[in-house]
Each structure stands twice: as structure tokens, then as C-alpha cells.
Image: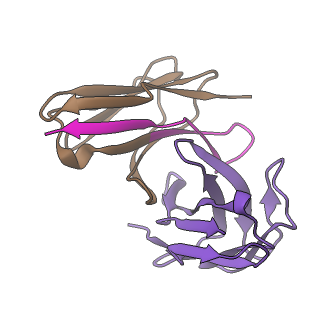
């Protein structure tokens, strides 16, 4: 079965610094989703990547999917307190049009 | 964008009682909704896929008689935790499919505490 591994599990970053979160799949990814969750709240959709080599940006967050479609990275530039939260990657399941499998999440703390 | 609401946001109940959680798509119709459970510091665990007008599809290991799902309309799915016990305490999140890329839009979650 397909598994998603996220790294690091947690990250403490000084405000203003850049950071990267990785999501690695044991199999080829067919649709990779990035979500953000604040503690005790629902998930907010950030970006979706489908094509090998694809890169998308939204404000200061950039997500990339590698050519082999087995790894995605989420990069935040000049981090701000509003970036704090848990970042989850999700991948489309081979046996379902809609269901996703999930990474364990990366907890991001921004130090002022 | 697509908005999904959940009610209640928090519920505390006594062991043995049943609790109903509602998931609504506010500005779109959702033929498919998902129910997840999230444990502290853990990822989302898919419990079941809720299909409008038909029976829910449960993931392996999830008791369908324990977690009753009803998707009676295109904007509402309900999850009823029957005879709740302390081990059912958790954060329950629903999502609905919308958009051209079949994105999942999540509700804000419901924190269930069973005493």
C-alpha cells in the first residue's frame, strides 16, 4: 500500500527565515495536495500538484512536485507568525477517484 | 470558495449516550463527503465515505454499527457515534469534494469528549 512520509515532524523557525517541508511517497503520486491546519481546526487547502516538475506558488508559499512524482516540497519564504500550524500532504489513492492518503503532518512553530 | 460547516464544534457527553455530528456544504452540492478522525499528533484517519442517497463505505476496522452515517441530502451528512465510550473521544473532521480538481474542502472539526 502507498505511504506518505513527511519530514521534519516538527520545525521551529525564527520569524523571517525560510523553511522547507518534504513529503515523500513510496509510490508514484497521482495528485499531491498540501493543506494547513491550525490546532483544533479544520484543514485549509493550499495547493494541488499533478504533473512531474510542476511548481505552484501562493503568496510566500511554493510547492513543487519532482519529475519522478514521488516527492513534493513546500517552501515558505520569509516566514511569519501566520504561517504557524500543521502542514499535511495528501495523495490521491490509486483505487479511488477522491480519497486521499495522508502524511503524518509537520508542526511548524514561528519564533518572533 | 467552497465552504463546509460542522456542528457542533465541541461536545461533551456521558459514556453510553449517542452523539450526532452534522456536516454541511454551504454553497455547493456534495454527492460525496468523507469523515475523518484525528488523534493528537497523528494524521487524519479516514473512517468512511458518505455517498448521497446510498450507504456509506466504511474503511477497514471502522464499525459501521458504531459510527452511523447518513447522507440524506446533497448538502448534509451526519455521523452518529452510538453508545459513545471514552475511547471514542477524538477530533472528527468531515470534508466534501468540490472544484475541477476534486479538491477536498474540510469542515472546522468537532471535538468529542466522552466522560
> Is residue A82 among what the camera can see?
yes
Q: Which residue is drawn at 50% across and 73% down?
A: B9
On whether residue A106 falls in the magenta region, the answer is yes
Q: Which residue is drawn at 47% across and 30% down?
A: A51
| Image spot of residue A43 (x, y percent) | 45, 55
> Is residue B22 among what the camera can see?
no
Total numbered labels: 0
- Which residue of the protein is positioned furthest toward the top in this rendering? A68
- Which residue of the protein is positioned furthest toward the right in this rendering? B65
| Image spot of residue A75 (x, y percent) | 29, 30
Q: Which chain is brown?
A: A
Q: Judge left or right: residue B30 versus residue A57.
A: right
Q: Could you say which quadrant of the image residue A10 lies in?
A: top left
Q: Could you say which quadrant of the image residue B66 lies in?
A: bottom right
Q: Judge left or right: residue B94 versus residue B106.
A: right
Q: Chain B is drawn in which colour?
A: purple
As displayed, is residue A76 above or below residue B90? Answer: above
Q: What stretch is highlighted in magenta?
A: A88-112
Asked whether A39 or B54 is in front, the reply is A39
As displayed, is residue A23 above or below residue B33? Answer: above
On-image quarter of the N terminus of chain A: top right
On whether residue A4 falls in the magenta region, the answer is no
| Image spot of residue A83 (x, y percent) | 25, 44
| Image spot of residue B101 (x, y percent) | 50, 51
Q: Residue at x 50, y 61 (%)?
A: B106
Amino acid at each position: 500500500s502507498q505511504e506518505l512520509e513527511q519530514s521534519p515532524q516538527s520545525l521551529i523557525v525564527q520569524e523571517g527565515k525560510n523553511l522547507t517541508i518534504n513529503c515523500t511517497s513510496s509510490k508514484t503520486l497521482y495528485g499531491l495536495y498540501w493543506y494547513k491546519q491550525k490546532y483544533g481546526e479544520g484543514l485549509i487547502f493550499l495547493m494541488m500538484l499533478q504533473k512531474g516538475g510542476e511548481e505552484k506558488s501562493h503568496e510566500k508559499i511554493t510547492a513543487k512536485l519532482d519529475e519522478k512524482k514521488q516527492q513534493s516540497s513546500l517552501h515558505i519564504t520569509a516566514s511569519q507568525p501566520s504561517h504557524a500550524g500543521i502542514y499535511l500532504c495528501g495523495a490521491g489513492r490509486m483505487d479511488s477517484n477522491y480519497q486521499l492518503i495522508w502524511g503524518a503532518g509537520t508542526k511548524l512553530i514561528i519564533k518572533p | 470558495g467552497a465552504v463546509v460547516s460542522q456542528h457542533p464544534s465541541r461536545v461533551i457527553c456521558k459514556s453510553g449516550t449517542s452523539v450526532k455530528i452534522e456536516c454541511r456544504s454551504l454553497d455547493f452540492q456534495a454527492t460525496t463527503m468523507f469523515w475523518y478522525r484525528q488523534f493528537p499528533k497523528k494524521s487524519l484517519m479516514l473512517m468512511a465515505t458518505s455517498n448521497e442517497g446510498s450507504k456509506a463505505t466504511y474503511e477497514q476496522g471502522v464499525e459501521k454499527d458504531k459510527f452511523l452515517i447518513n447522507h440524506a441530502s446533497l448538502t448534509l451528512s451526519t455521523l452518529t457515534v452510538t453508545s459513545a465510550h471514552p475511547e471514542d473521544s477524538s477530533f472528527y473532521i468531515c470534508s466534501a469534494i468540490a472544484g475541477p480538481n476534486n479538491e477536498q474542502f474540510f469542515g472546522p472539526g468537532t471535538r468529542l469528549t466522552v466522560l
